[in-house]
Image (tube, grey):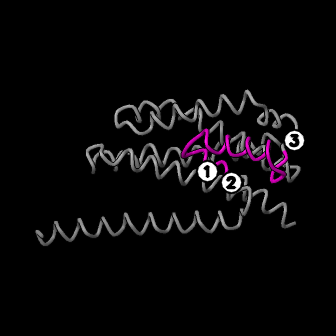
Amino acid sequence: MTEIIGGVLGAFGLSASAGLNAYIPLLVVSLLARFTNLIELAEPWNALESWWVIGVLAVLGIVEFVADKVPAVDQVNDAVQTFIRPIAGAILFATSAQTITDINPVLSMICGLLVAGSVHAAKSLVARPIVEVSTAGAGVPVVSALEDILATIISVLSIVLPILMVILVFLLIWWVAWFFNRRRKERKHIIETGI
């Protein structure tokens, strides 16, 4: 039972990290499946273990890594990734959930699509525009690098320690909500007092 819960939590974590960066979690799953016993991919998902898939994911990951750091290009990248990130989330959810449980692959893919799509929408429609406007684009590379680091950590934890990953994600959500709430209160105070 614990293995099933861990598998489902891991599936949610992997698909959520795909909403931040499509290729990091796919590459993490591919490499861990290829070189460790931490994850074993069932048919047809074991195609992710092949060298050519790992190579393609590495190249696409580098392209997204660079494109996401340039203020004007990141918007174009996010538009393109609107289709790719949810699909990556669907694949990751299905690979992780089907490896541990007998969840229907279509249901798994729908869950992954919704999770990754939601994270991507929050990132590209809410968080990134706020960062671009408030920092005149200077904060984009920093936030993008933090997203890449977070996607990597969540991806690895989703496979190795899914319970810890859930705790980390909840703490991160709480911190982001607290931070934006604090900023909103500071702005309101400045407007009301003039200082």
Q: Residue at x 41, y 50 (%)?
A: 143
Residue furthest to the front in view is: 35
Is residue 15 rendered to the left or right of residue 43?
left
Residue sitting nearer the eye, 193 or 52: 52
Q: Disc 3 and disc 2: Cα gap in Å?
A: 18 Å
Q: Amino acid at mark 2?
A: Phe
Q: Amino acid at mark 3?
A: Ala
Dot 2 and dot 1 residues touching (CB under 8 Å): yes
Quadrant showing the C terminus: bottom left
Between the residue at mark 2 and the residue at mark 1, the CA separation in whole angstroms equals 6 Å
User: Which residue sits at x=32%, y=45%?
Assistant: 132
Q: Position of residue 190 (x, y in %)?
A: 17, 68
Residue 27 lies in magenta, yes or no? yes
Label 1: which residue?
Answer: 16
Whole-percent x, y for residue 65 in the image: 50, 38
For the residues labelled 3 and 1, the Cα–Cα distance comes to 21 Å
Magenta part of the protein: which range? Answer: 13-40
Using a 10 Å C-alpha cutoff, classify the residue at mark 3 as few (fewer than 14 neighbours), some (14 to 19) or many (20 or more): some
In this view, 11 is above or below 55: below
Q: Is residue 133 left or right of residue 51?
A: left
> Quarter holding the N terminus?
bottom right
| Residue type of the residue flagged with mark 1 | Ala
Q: In the image, is residue 124 above or below residue 62?
A: below
Q: Are marks 3 and 1 in contact (CB under 8 Å)?
A: no
In the rendered structure, the answer to whether residue 189 lies left or right of residue 119 reads left
Residue position for label 3 = 42
Pointer 2: what residue?
12
Circle nearer the viewer, 3 or 2: 3
x, y percentage for residue 104?
A: 84, 44
Closer to the chain start, of discs 3 and 2, is 2
Residue 158: x and y in percent read: 70, 57
